[in-house]
Amino acid sequence: MRFHLWRMRDQPFADVCHAALHKAVSENADAIFVDTDPHVLALLRDEELRALLLNGAVGQ
């Protein structure tokens, strides 16, 4: 999980990541991410990763 956290925080598009995290759990997520690798949507829905990224756990 630390790798995924580091990898996502290391990207220059933090606002896109934040939006994707919120869209991934919306009722339209399957339509929004239809052209995306299914593993990406599963990762964006991972509760542990979401908690770390959305709660600002930088450097943990």
Image (tube, rainbow, N blue to C red):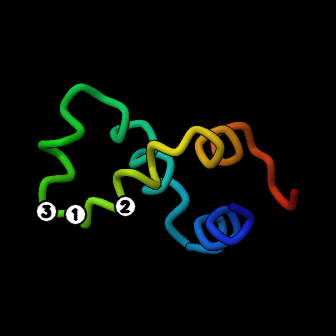
For the C terminus, the image quarter is: bottom right
Q: Secondary structure at mark 1?
A: loop
Seen in the picture, residue 53 relative to 40 is either above or below; the reply is: above
Cα distance, mark 1 to mark 2? 7 Å
Please report contact status of discs 2 and 3: CB closer than 8 Å, yes or no.
Answer: no
Report if the CB atoms under discs 1 and 2 are less than 8 Å apart.
yes
Q: Position of residue 49 (x, y in %)?
A: 62, 49
Residue visible at 39% across and 51% down in the picture? 42
Quarter of the view holding residue 27: top left
What kind of element bears circle 2? helix
Residue 35, label in figure: 3
How crowded pointer 3 is (Cα within 10 Å; few <14, some 14-19, many 20+) is rated as few
Q: Which residue is mark 2?
A: 40
- Counting the numbered discs, the total is 3
Report helix, strand or loop for mark 3.
loop
| Residue furthest right in the image | 60
Residue carrying label 1? 36
Question: As rendered, which of 15 and 34 lies closer to the eye?
Answer: 34
Label 2 Cα neighbours within 10 Å, binned few <14 / some 14-19 / many ≥20: few
